[in-house]
C-alpha cells in the first residue's frame, strides 16, 4: 500500500487571538481589528478568509477586509446572522477569539497589474473587496484606473462610510454608489447595482473586474458586464458557501468538484462557467 | 506500491488453515495486539468490533453495517476540549496504536485506500492519519450477494494488495487457503507456526457477481461527463426521502459537521465532529439561509459525482468500492447500480443520436 | 449578572413533558443553579411579571388559550415551544382531521357547549416562537441543549436531519430490516435515535424533516409492506398539521 508517511498536522486547532478594536458600522455589521499572539503576521492575500471561533459557539468563515499592506493586525467585518456572529457582536476590545487560517485562494493580483480595475460590490460584498481595494490604493502606481461600484439595499446599510468619503475625495478613484430603497435624505443614485454599469466608459480589453455580493447578484452583474463586452477572462468572482473546516475536508462548501475553501472563494469567471452549481 | 496481479499470486506462499487453526490463529493474534474483526450485531447484521473472544468472530458475512472507516474517522469524535471562561483548550490526544484487522473483505480495504487519498490530499489530517498508522489487514474472501458489485468498479475477488495475509475459503467446512501477501504476513505465519505450507499453487477462487454495471469501470467517468442534465436524477429523486443513510454508511464518504457543546457547569465544553452527508437537506445551506442544493435530484447527483467523477478526476480511481451498503440499507430501495446503468443507457442513447 | 428568569406554562397536553423535566436527576440541581424559576405549576406557585425565557408545553386548542399565549408572549423575551403538542399540535391535532362538532360530541357528549374548542394548533400559529424542543415527550438531550444554550446566550442548534443519521452513527441494526414499520427516514433527529437504539421502531414523534418528500415517504413504506392508509395514518399521528395541508383551521 502507499505510504502514510506524510507531513500531517492538526488542522482544527484555533490560535487564540485578541480583539483590539470593535467598531459598529451598521445596525447589523461590526468591524473587528484582531491581533494574532506575539505580533505574528496573518500573511494573507486579498480575498482570503479565516475561520473565527468562540468556544461554545462554534466556528464560521469570515473574509478578511483589511489589506495585507496595512499594519500587522487584520480586520474582519461581520454581519450578525448566526450563532457565532451573534456572539461575536457581544465581544469587546480585549476579548479573545480563535482564528484558523488564512484559507482559500485570494485574488490573482499579478494579473491586475497595469490594468484598469473595476470593483463591483453588493451589500456586505464590499467587506472582502475592501481588502483588495485598499491593496490597489496602497500600490496605486501599479494600476491604471480604479473604479468602485457599490450597491446596498438602503442607505442605512452602507459600510465603511469613512473610507467611502476618502475614496470620493481622491481624484484617482472613481466611486459610484446606489441604493435600492432610498430614504428621505438620500440624494444619490437609486436602483440595483447593475444600473451603474451601462454608463461607464471602459477600455474593456484592459479592465479587470472583481465582483463580490449576495448569490443572486452574480447572474445579473455578469449579464451587464457582457453587455459592455468585457471578456470573460477579465472577470473574477468571490463565491459564498458554507466553508466549515477551511481545509478541504468537510465537504460543505463544495461546488461540483471544487472545494470553495481551497480553490475559491475567488474564482476566475471562465472557471465558474465549468462549474454548473457556481452561479 | 505492492500490486499483486494474478501471475504474482502463484508465486505467493500458501498455507492451509482449517476452522480450528483459524480460531487458534485469531487467539494468537489477540495475544500480540488488538484485533478487530466482524461480529454479529442484532438479529441478522454484522459490525466490526474489537475481539474479546475469538469465538465471536464471524467469518462468513455479507457486509457490516458501518464500514471500516469508523476506526479512523469515528462517527462522533471530540476535536478539542475547552474552558469557556479561560478561553483555553486542549486538543484530543490521538495515539497510533498497533492493531490487526482480521476477516476484511477486499473492497473494504480499497475503501480505506480511497480515504487515505482523501485525508492525505491537500492538507494531510493528523486525526485520521494517526489513527490509521500501525494497522495491519488480514483479508478474507466472500460470496457476493445481490448488492455487491465490486468487480464492476475494478475490485475483482483476487485483488488482495494491501493485505498482509488473505484467507480464501476453499470448502464449506471453513477450510481456507491462506496467501502470504507481504513480509508482515510471513512473519505472522512463521511465529504462529502451527500450519503447513502447501506446495501446489492455487489461485484465489473466482466469484460470480449478480449485480453488475453495464460498462467497464474505466469508462464510467466518461459517462459522467455526459449525464449531468440527465432525467435519471429526477426519477431517483421521486423515490429518495433524503435520510442520508447512503452517505453515512458509505465506505468512502468522509464529510463531517462540527458542533460545540457546553457542559451544564457553563464552563467546560467540547468541539465535536460528526459524520455528515450531502444528501441531507441543510448540508449546503449558508448562514444567510440560501441552500445551494435544495432539491433531492441535485443532492443525489452530487453524491454520485463524488463517487465517479469529482475525486476520480484527481485520484484516477473510482471512489465507489461496490460494497452495496447504500443500496442494501436504503429505506426506499434505491439501487446505485440501477442508477449507474440508467445513466449508461442515457449516455448510449445520446451517443447514438450524435 | 442576575440569573435569567425562566417560566414554564402548560396548555393542551398531557403534561408529560413538564414531568419529564423533573426526571433529570443528575442535572436538575445544576440547571436550577443557572436560572431563577419563576413559574412552574407542577413544582411551585410563584408568579412573575416578566420572563427571560418562557417554555410552553401543549397545543393551543381553546379560545381562552389564544388569549393566554398572547399574554405570555408579551411578557417573554424568548419563547420556546416544548414538546410536540406545542411545536406542531402533536397528537392533539388528530382531532383536526375530523369535523370539530363531531369531536366535541365524542368527548363531551351533550355537554359539548360548555367546552368551546378550536382545532389544535402549534404555538407558532398564534405567536412568534423563537426555539423548539421536539418530541413526544420532548427529547431530553435536546431540552438540555436548548436550555443550556439559551441560558448562556447562544442560539441552540436546530437539528434538521433524519433519525436515520443518528441511528447510523450508533450503528444500529435497521428496524425496517426486521420487518418493523419505521418512520426514522423522514422524522427529524435530535433524539439520538433512542427508539431504534432500544429495538423499537420510530413513531415519528418529532415530526417530519423540513423539505420532506411526502410521496416518496409513502412509496417507501409501501415497499416495506405497509398499505397507503396505514402509512398515512401513522405519519399523521404526530404530524397531522404538517402533513395534511388540506386541514381547515376552523377560524
Image (cartoon, grey):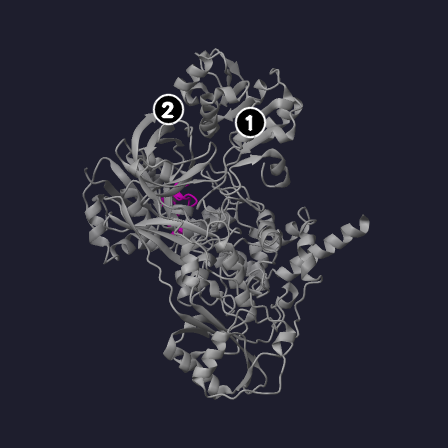
Earlier sequence position, callout 2 versus callout 1? 2
- Most extreme residue toward the right is B353
Q: Nearer the viewer, residue B336 or A233?
A: A233
Residue A218 location, quadrant: top right
Location of residue A202 in the rendering, given as x and y in whole percent from the top left corner:
62, 18
Q: Name the spot of residue B218 as percent of width and height, x first.
A: 68, 59
Tell me the number on the disc at residue A112: 1
Name the residue: 30% across, 33% down: A19
Q: Crowdedness of circle 1 by 10 Å Cα count: few (<14), some, many (20+)?
A: some
Above or below, B208 against B175 in this view is above
Q: Mark 2 points at which residue?
A: A25
Q: Quadrant of the N terminus of chain C?
A: top left
SS for tag 2? loop
Q: Which chain carries label 2?
A: A
In the rendered view, tell whether residue B14 sits above or below residue B1. below
Q: In percent of the image, x 38 and y 28: which residue is there?
A: A28
- The magenta stretch is C108-124
Distance, label 2 to label 1, CA atoms, is 29 Å
Amino acid at each position: 500500500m502507499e505510504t502514510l508517511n506524510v507531513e500531517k498536522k492538526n488542522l482544527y486547532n484555533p490560535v487564540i487571538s485578541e480583539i483590539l478594536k470593535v467598531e459598529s458600522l451598521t445596525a447589523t455589521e461590526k468591524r473587528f481589528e484582531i491581533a494574532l499572539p506575539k505580533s505574528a503576521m496573518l500573511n494573507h492575500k486579498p480575498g482570503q478568509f479565516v475561520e473565527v471561533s468562540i468556544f461554545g459557539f462554534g466556528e464560521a468563515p469570515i473574509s478578511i477586509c483589511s489589506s495585507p499592506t496595512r499594519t500587522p493586525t487584520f480586520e474582519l467585518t461581520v454581519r450578525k446572522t448566526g450563532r457565532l456572529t451573534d456572539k461575536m457582536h457581544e465581544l469587546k476590545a480585549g476579548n479573545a477569539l480563535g482564528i484558523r487560517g488564512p484559507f482559500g485562494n485570494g485574488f490573482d493580483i499579478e494579473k491586475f497589474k497595469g490594468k484598469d480595475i473595476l470593483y463591483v460590490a453588493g451589500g456586505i460584498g464590499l467587506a472582502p473587496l475592501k481588502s483588495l481595494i485598499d491593496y490597489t490604493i496602497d500600490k496605486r502606481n501599479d494600476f491604471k484606473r480604479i473604479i468602485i461600484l457599490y450597491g446596498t439595499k438602503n442607505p442605512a446599510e452602507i459600510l465603511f462610510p469613512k473610507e467611502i468619503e476618502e475614496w470620493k475625495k481622491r481624484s484617482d478613484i472613481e466611486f459610484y454608489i446606489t441604493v435600492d430603497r432610498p430614504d428621505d435624505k438620500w440624494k444619490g443614485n437609486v436602483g440595483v447595482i447593475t444600473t451603474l454599469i451601462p454608463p461607464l466608459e471602459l477600455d474593456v480589453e484592459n479592465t479587470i473586474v472583481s465582483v463580490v455580493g449576495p448569490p443572486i447578484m452574480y447572474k445579473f452583474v455578469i449579464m451587464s458586464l457582457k453587455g459592455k463586452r468585457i471578456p470573460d477572462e477579465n472577470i473574477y468572482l468571490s463565491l459564498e458557501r458554507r466553508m466549515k473546516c477551511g481545509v478541504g475536508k468537510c465537504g460543505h462548501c463544495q461546488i461540483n468538484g471544487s472545494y470553495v475553501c481551497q480553490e475559491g472563494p475567488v474564482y476566475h469567471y471562465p472557471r465558474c462557467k465549468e462549474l454548473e452549481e457556481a452561479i | 506500491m505492492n500490486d499483486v496481479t494474478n501471475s504474482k499470486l502463484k508465486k505467493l506462499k500458501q498455507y492451509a488453515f482449517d476452522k480450528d487453526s483459524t480460531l487458534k490463529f485469531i487467539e494468537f493474534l489477540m495475544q500480540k495486539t488488538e484485533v478487530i474483526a466482524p461480529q454479529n450485531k442484532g438479529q441478522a447484521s454484522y459490525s466490526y468490533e474489537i475481539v474479546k473472544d475469538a469465538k465471536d468472530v464471524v467469518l462468513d458475512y455479507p457486509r457490516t453495517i458501518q464500514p471500516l472507516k469508523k476506526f479512523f474517522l469515528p462517527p462522533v469524535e471530540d476535536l478539542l476540549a475547552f474552558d469557556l471562561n479561560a478561553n483555553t483548550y486542549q486538543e484530543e490526544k490521538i495515539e497510533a496504536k498497533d492493531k490487526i484487522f482480521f476477516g476484511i473483505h477486499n473492497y473494504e480495504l480499497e475503501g480505506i485506500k480511497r480515504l487515505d487519498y482523501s485525508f492525505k490530499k491537500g492538507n494531510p489530517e493528523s486525526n485520521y492519519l494517526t489513527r490509521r498508522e500501525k494497522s495491519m489487514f488480514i483479508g478474507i474472501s466472500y460470496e457476493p450477494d445481490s448488492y455487491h458489485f465490486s468487480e464492476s468498479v475494478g475490485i475483482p475477488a483476487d485483488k488482495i494488495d494491501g493485505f498482509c495475509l488473505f484467507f480464501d475459503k476453499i470448502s464449506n467446512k471453513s477450510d481456507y487457503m491462506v496467501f502470504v501477501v507481504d513480509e508482515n504476513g510471513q512473519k505472522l505465519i512463521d511465529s504462529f507456526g502451527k500450519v503447513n505450507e502447501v506446495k501446489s499453487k492455487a489461485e484465489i477462487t473466482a466469484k460470480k457477481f449478480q449485480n453488475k454495471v453495464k460498462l467497464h469501470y474505466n469508462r464510467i467517468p466518461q459517462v459522467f461527463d455526459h449525464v449531468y442534465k440527465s432525467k435519471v436524477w429526477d426519477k431517483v429523486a421521486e423515490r429518495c426521502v433524503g435520510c442520508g443513510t447512503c452517505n453515512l454508511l458509505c465506505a468512502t464518504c468522509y464529510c463531517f459537521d462540527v458542533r460545540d457543546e457546553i457542559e451544564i457547569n457553563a464552563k467546560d465544553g467540547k468541539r465535536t465532529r460528526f459524520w455528515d452527508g450531502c444528501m441531507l437537506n441543510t448540508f449546503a445551506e449558508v448562514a444567510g439561509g440560501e441552500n445551494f442544493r435544495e432539491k433531492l435530484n441535485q443532492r443525489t447527483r452530487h453524491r454520485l459525482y463524488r463517487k465517479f467523477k469529482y475525486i476520480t478526476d484527481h485520484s484516477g480511481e473510482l471512489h465507489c468500492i461496490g460494497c452495496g451498503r447504500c443500496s442494501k440499507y436504503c429505506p426506499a430501495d434505491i439501487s446505485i447500480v440501477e442508477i449507474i446503468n440508467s445513466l449508461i443507457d442515457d449516455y448510449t442513447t445520446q451517443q447514438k443520436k450524435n | 449578572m442576575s440569573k435569567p428568569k425562566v417560566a414554564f406554562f402548560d396548555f393542551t397536553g398531557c403534561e408529560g413533558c413538564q414531568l419529564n423535566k423533573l426526571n433529570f436527576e443528575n442535572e436538575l440541581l445544576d440547571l436550577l443553579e443557572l436560572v431563577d424559576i419563576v413559574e412552574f405549576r407542577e413544582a411551585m406557585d410563584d408568579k412573575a411579571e416578566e420572563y427571560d425565557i418562557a417554555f410552553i408545553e401543549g397545543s393551543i386548542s381553546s379560545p381562552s388559550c389564544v388569549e393566554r399565549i398572547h399574554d405570555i408572549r408579551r411578557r417573554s423575551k424568548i419563547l420556546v415551544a416544548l414538546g410536540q403538542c406545542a411545536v406542531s399540535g402533536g397528537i392533539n391535532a388528530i382531532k383536526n382531521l375530523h369535523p370539530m362538532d363531531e369531536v366535541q360530541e365524542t368527548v363531551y357528549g351533550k355537554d359539548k357547549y360548555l367546552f368551546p374548542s378550536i382545532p389544535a394548533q402549534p404555538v407558532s400559529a398564534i405567536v412568534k416562537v423563537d426555539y423548539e424542543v421536539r418530541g413526544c415527550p420532548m427529547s431530553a438531550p435536546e431540552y438540555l441543549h436548548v436550555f443550556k444554550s439559551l441560558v448562556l446566550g447562544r442560539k441552540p442548534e436546530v437539528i434538521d436531519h433524519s433519525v436515520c443519521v443518528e441511528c447510523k452513527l450508533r450503528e444500529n441494526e435497521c428496524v425496517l430490516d426486521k420487518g418493523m414499520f419505521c418512520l426514522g427516514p423522514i422524522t427529524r433527529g435530535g433524539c439520538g435515535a433512542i427508539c431504534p437504539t432500544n429495538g423499537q421502531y420510530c413513531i415519528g414523534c418529532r415530526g417530519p424533516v423540513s423539505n420532506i418528500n411526502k410521496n416518496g415517504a409513502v412509496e417507501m413504506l409501501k415497499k416495506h409492506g405497509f398499505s397507503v392508509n396505514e402509512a398515512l395514518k401513522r405519519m399523521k399521528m404526530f404530524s397531522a398539521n404538517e402533513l395534511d395541508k388540506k386541514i381547515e383551521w376552523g377560524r
